[in-house]
């Protein structure tokens, strides 16, 4: 990690550690060495409590505050800070081996500062120094507890904020909730411990410490159950998206959002397979390195992520700097591996088909666990179904909206577009022109040159019509060799000029097939709305009628309905099934 980003966290952490060390040194002469046996006993209890610590996204939940509060009541601030500092460090060394020693020192130091700050509030409010269990000390002791809670949370929050930059507030609320419950239970127990110690000695403390451990064990199970519920909720939300009509981007963003229910991360990226480019491209990215990663790609079989994609496998990188699977020479390009210490990678699989890859990155080492991989894998499986369904829907949508041979709009899609445009014209008092185009003597072309030549002629018509109308309207294939063009907002004169360009372009067209050169011509018919027709069906009939007149005139010409002698029109589309009729 860039030292520029790490420096504020380093300065803050070691400042807290040094201040705590100074207080410990300052208070050491104030320790009552006659009570060493009792303090060692309390130290052992703190170590035991720390071994059952419940880890949350922000800090840890520990019932050791019962012992800490009891130590403060019995031995004063000097005994409390020394018991807490040593007990916290020893407990974390035994039970939390993944945590760095710097973090262990910080955890112990923030307890020391919390106790010192709370003791200052206690004395300021008139709390007794010798008889802390007296009723007169009720308000100072309550203030001591509240201050200790506040300082503890504040120091940890600042530490995590500097360490992570994008701290999610939802985790802060959860931690405050569980830590508040812990304090509400442990403070009375700590007070009773001190009372029983004065009555029956150390056995009284031990008698109440057992329920403290039981409570912490139950709390640990409950929080894990709550975490499992979050994971199931994530699966539910992804599953619900299968039928919720969400867009692809919404589903992929939902993956990263629901992944946040399972595990805390700094950056999340969803790569989606782009077949035309033969690689995975970034579809959505969330986190502090969004700008750096938005154009990154994963190529099949190249670098670490590419190898995982090719093998359809998932992986956890606990420390990218010390993992043998990460080759710094191969993975030298800027990417998520270079920006994070921990990685969690799962594929997006629909059956055996690879649709993409989900990658979560954290700047902390050992940020991800095997349970995180299993749950994210299940979420990714559900999401892959949604992505695959959307891909199939898009393919079907393209098929139903386009003509297979020419790529122009299908009849159904054209009618929907035309109906919408005529509705807009009705509200704006505008005009719509319709041009019908038909290949002259198409049957003879197919008989003499073959079907392939006929298809090539239709493709030429498609290119010619598309190049002339550009963005002025839309075109569709209305029959075997017939095309229809809709031009919203274009009147009869402009539409006639455009029809003339289309016809001249077709006259100059040549298709070479089997060593032969095939030339061809076209007939065109033009009608306008609302001048020539009262609705869409009428407009289609009038345009077809003008086309039939052009055919009767020998073809290779244009006929405008408004300039023709009146004859009964012929329908171009059947209203019931939208099939072209001649």
Image (cartoon, helix red, strand yellow):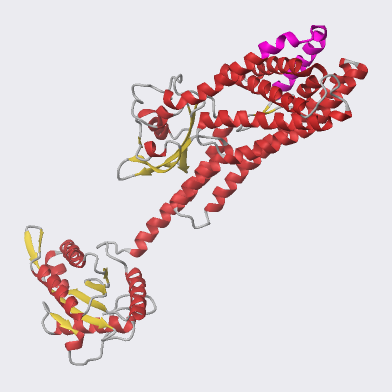
Magenta stretch: includes residue 406: no
Which residue is at the front of the view, 147 or 38?
147
The answer to whether residue 374 is visible is yes
The quadrant holding residue 334 is top left
Q: Is residue 243 left or right of residue 226?
A: left
Report whether residue 97 is seen.
Answer: no
- The residue shown at (78%, 18%) is 76
Q: Is residue 49 magenta?
A: yes
The answer to whether 466 appears left or right of 321 in the picture is left
Q: Position of residue 49 (x, y in %)?
A: 74, 22
Is the C terminus in the top left, top right, bottom left or bottom right quadrant?
bottom left
In the rendered image, the vertical position of residue 546 relative to residue 346, given as above or below: below
Residue positioned 27% across, 85% down in the render: 570
Residue found at the very far bottom of the displayed protein: 566
Please give the count of numbered marks on the rendered protein.
0
Q: Quadrant of residue 114?
A: top right
- Magenta range: 24-52
Q: Does 109 sit above or below residue 461?
A: above
Q: Residue 541 location, x and y as percent?
A: 28, 83
Q: Nearer the viewer, residue 256 or 442?
A: 256
- Which residue is at 25% across, 91% downward? 568
- Residue in the image at 63% along x and 14% along y: 21
Q: Please identify the dominant SS of the magenta region.
A: helix
Q: Where does residue 138 sit, x and y in percent of width and height?
A: 84, 31
Seen in the picture, residue 351 relative to 474 is either above or below; the reply is above
């Amino acid at each position: 990690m860039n030292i520029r980003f790490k420096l504020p966290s380093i300065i803050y952490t070691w400042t807290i550690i040094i201040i705590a060390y100074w207080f410990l040194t300052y208070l050491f002469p104030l320790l009552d060495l006659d009570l060493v046996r009792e303090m060692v006993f309390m130290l052992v209890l703190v170590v035991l409590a720390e071994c059952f610590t419940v880890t949350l996204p922000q800090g840890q939940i520990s019932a050791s505050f019962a012992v800490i509060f009891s130590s403060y009541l019995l031995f004063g601030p000097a005994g409390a800070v020394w018991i807490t500092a040593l007990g916290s460090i020893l407990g974390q060394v035994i039970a939390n081996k993944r945590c760095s020693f710097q973090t262990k020192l910080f955890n112990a130091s923030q307890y020391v500062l919390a106790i010192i700050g709370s003791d200052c509030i206690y004395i300021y409010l008139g709390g007794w120094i010798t008889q802390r269990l007296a009723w007169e000390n009720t308000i100072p002791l309550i203030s001591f507890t509240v201050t200790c809670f506040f300082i503890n949370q504040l120091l940890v929050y600042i530490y995590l904020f500097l360490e992570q930059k994008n701290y999610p507030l939802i985790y802060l609320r959860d931690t405050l909730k569980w830590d508040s419950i812990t304090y509400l239970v442990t403070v009375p127990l700590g007070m009773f411990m001190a009372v029983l110690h004065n009555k029956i000695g150390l056995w009284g403390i031990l008698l109440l410490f057992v329920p403290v451990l039981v409570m912490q064990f139950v709390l640990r199970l409950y929080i894990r159950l709550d975490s499992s519920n979050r994971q199931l909720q994530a699966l539910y939300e992804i599953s619900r998206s299968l039928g919720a009509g969400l867009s692809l981007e919404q589903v992929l963003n939902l993956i990263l959002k629901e992944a946040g229910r399972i595990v805390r991360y700094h950056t999340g990226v969803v790569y989606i397979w782009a077949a035309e480019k033969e690689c995975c491209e970034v579809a959505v990215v969330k986190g502090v390195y969004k700008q750096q990663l938005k154009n990154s790609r994963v190529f099949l079989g190249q670098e670490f992520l590419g190898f995982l994609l090719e093998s359809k496998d998932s992986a956890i990188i606990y420390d990218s700097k010390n993992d043998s699977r990460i080759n710094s020479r191969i993975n030298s390009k800027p990417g998520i591996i270079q920006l994070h210490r921990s990685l969690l990678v799962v594929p997006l699989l629909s059956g055996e088909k690879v649709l993409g890859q989900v990658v979560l990155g954290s700047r902390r080492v050992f940020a991800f666990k095997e349970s995180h991989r299993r749950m994210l894998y299940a979420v990714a499986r559900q999401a892959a179904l949604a992505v695959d369904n959307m891909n199939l829907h898009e393919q079907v949508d393209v098929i139903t909206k386009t003509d297979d041979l020419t790529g122009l709009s299908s009849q159904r899609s054209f009618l929907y577009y035309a109906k919408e445009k005529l509705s807009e014209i009705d509200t704006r008092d505008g005009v719509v022109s319709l041009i019908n185009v038909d290949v002259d003597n198409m049957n003879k072309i197919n008989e003499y040159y073959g079907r392939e030549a006929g298809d090539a002629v239709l493709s030429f018509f498609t290119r010619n019509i598309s190049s002339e109308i550009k963005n002025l309207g839309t075109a569709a294939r209305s029959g075997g060799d017939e095309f229809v063009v809709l031009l919203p907002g274009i009147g009869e004169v402009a539409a006639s000029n455009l029809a003339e360009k289309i016809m001249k372009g077709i006259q100059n067209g040549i298709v070479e097939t089997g060593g032969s050169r095939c030339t061809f011509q076209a007939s065109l018919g033009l009608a306008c709305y609302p001048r020539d027709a009262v609705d869409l069906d009428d407009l289609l009939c009038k345009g077809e009628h003008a086309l039939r007149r052009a055919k009767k005139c020998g073809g290779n010409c244009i006929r405008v309905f408004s300039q023709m002698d009146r004859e009964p029109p012929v329908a171009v589309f059947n209203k019931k099934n939208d099939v072209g009729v001649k």
